[in-house]
Amino acid sequence: MNQTSIVRKKAVHRPGVVVTGFAITLFFLGAIFSTAPADQKTARGEGNKSFLSTPVANFAEPWAMTFLPDGRLLVTEKAGRLLILSQDGKKSGPLAGVPAVDYGGQGGLGDVILHPFFSKNRLIYLSYAEAGGRDTRGAAVARARLVLAPNGGGRLVDLEIIWRQEPKVAGRGHFGHRLAFSPDGFLFITSGERQKFSPAQDMKQNLGKIIRLNDDGSVPASNPFADRGGITKQIWTLGHRNPLGIAFDAQGRLWSHEMGPRGGDELNLIKRGENYGYPLVSDGDHYDGTPIPDHATRPEFTAPKISWTPVIAPAGFIIYSGDMFPQWKNSGFIGGLASQALIRVAFEGERAWEAERFNMGKRIREVEQGPDGAIWVLEDETGGRLLKLTPNP
């Protein structure tokens, strides 16, 4: 995981946006909470944008959420529970049929998304840490059919595992395992390098990669390395550290953020077959202080569109398409763990920059857009709240 401070800030000389400590100070001075009722606060960021933050429910280490067509939410808790929540805060019991997870460290139950044709096939996708032999583990992705019960609960049936990180390795960090469907129906999976560094450049492993599959887990023939067979054919891009957010913009471009080492968190524009350089380059350094060459030293690798030093510790990601906040349409929203913030990113074609930072006072694990255009965020860790963000009158 990222540290909240660094020993020294690297001098970064490359295209893109670098957020300095001075700029972050300015953002936090502008992102303060105003006086409001105990159950509702107003967060303000640069540019005097504001919203009301209304708590809806509390969870035990929530990790991800997604909305069902009826407006209810599916919420994952890291220890292995999948819950259904109504927008007024009524919570179901844990759903049956969830796969066993290897819980500990950064591992456990992770992302949850719906199949693009969920209304017809009732399929959902879950990512999680799966135990292996000899104290090893790796991320896995399963799909199952969601059967809803009249009492507000439900269960998963016909569960099948459609993808695994290979190989399973020791340790409990950097699973990644964020999920997203592309507009044309392909499943994208972020796969962390499991704090092992070199797998991110090893084409015979799927660690440190972004993966592209068909909805059933098979590999599209149009993948950039499909002709190489084996694990390699799954790979869409390589050279990633711990990607914890992935989203498509209105033009179908894929964006992903990842945690850097000590410094150098990144937002990347993901393009077919490209190499993003880790661990050969980074705008951060190793935790022990060992330098990593900057992106500018190796132009053959694809540099990030935004690099953050100090880090924000990004988690969760949407590109907003709603009408409730018209001024933010087509903006990205990233949850900040160490930064305890909600970060708004502005886009112009293939350019991106941090536009605002809202101080949330808690680690933010997940961001999602509601059916009515409200923005929903999940706080991290035990007692993490689900907050609904709406415009400030």
Image: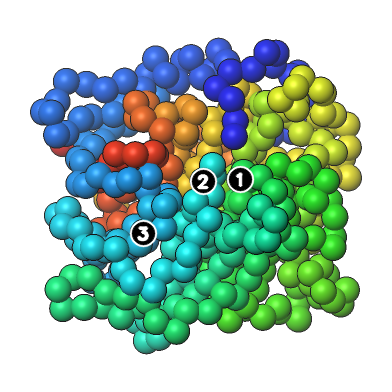
Residue 68 vertical placement versus 260 (above, below): below
Kindly indicate whether the residue at mark 2 contacts the one at mark 1 (C-beta within 8 angstroms): yes
In the rendering, at what x and y percent does residue 268 appear?
Answer: 66, 46
Tell me where residue 65 appears, x and y as whole percent.
37, 57
Per the model, the C-alpha gap separating discs 1 and 2 is 7 Å
> Residue at image x 49%, y 75%?
143
Relative image position of residue 177 (x, y in whole percent): 57, 56
Quarter of the image that includes the C terminus = top left
Amino acid on which the number 2 mark rests in the picture: Gly
* Residue at mark 1: 172
Q: Nearer the viewer, residue 170 or 208?
A: 170
Q: Quadrant of residue 234?
A: bottom right
* Residue 275, placed above or below residue 13: below
Residue at 47% across, 79% down: 159
Colour scheme employed for the rendering of this structure = rainbow
Residue annotated with mark 2: 104
Earlier in the chain: of badge 1 and badge 2, it is 2
Does residue 11 appear anywhere in the picture?
yes
How many angstroms separate mark 3 from mark 2 (CA)? 14 Å
Of the two numbered discs 3 and 2 on the same chain, state the one appearing first in sequence. Answer: 3
User: Is 271 on the left-hand or right-hand side of 327?
Assistant: right
Judging from the image, what secondary structure is the residue with disc 3 in? strand
Q: What residue is rendered at 42% in x and 29% in y?
A: 340
Q: Which residue has dot 3 on it?
A: 81
Could you classify mark 2 by the number of other residues whose Cα lies within 10 Å: few (under 14), some (14-19), or many (20 or more)?
few
Q: Which quadrant is the N terminus positioned in?
A: top right
Distance from the alpha carbon under mark 3 to that under mark 1: 19 Å
Q: Secondary structure at mark 1?
A: loop
- For the residue labelled by badge 2, is the local secondary structure a helix, a strand or a loop? loop
Residue at 88 percent across and 45 percent down: it is 300
- Tell me the kind of residue under disc 3: Arg
Quick check: can you spot residue 19? no
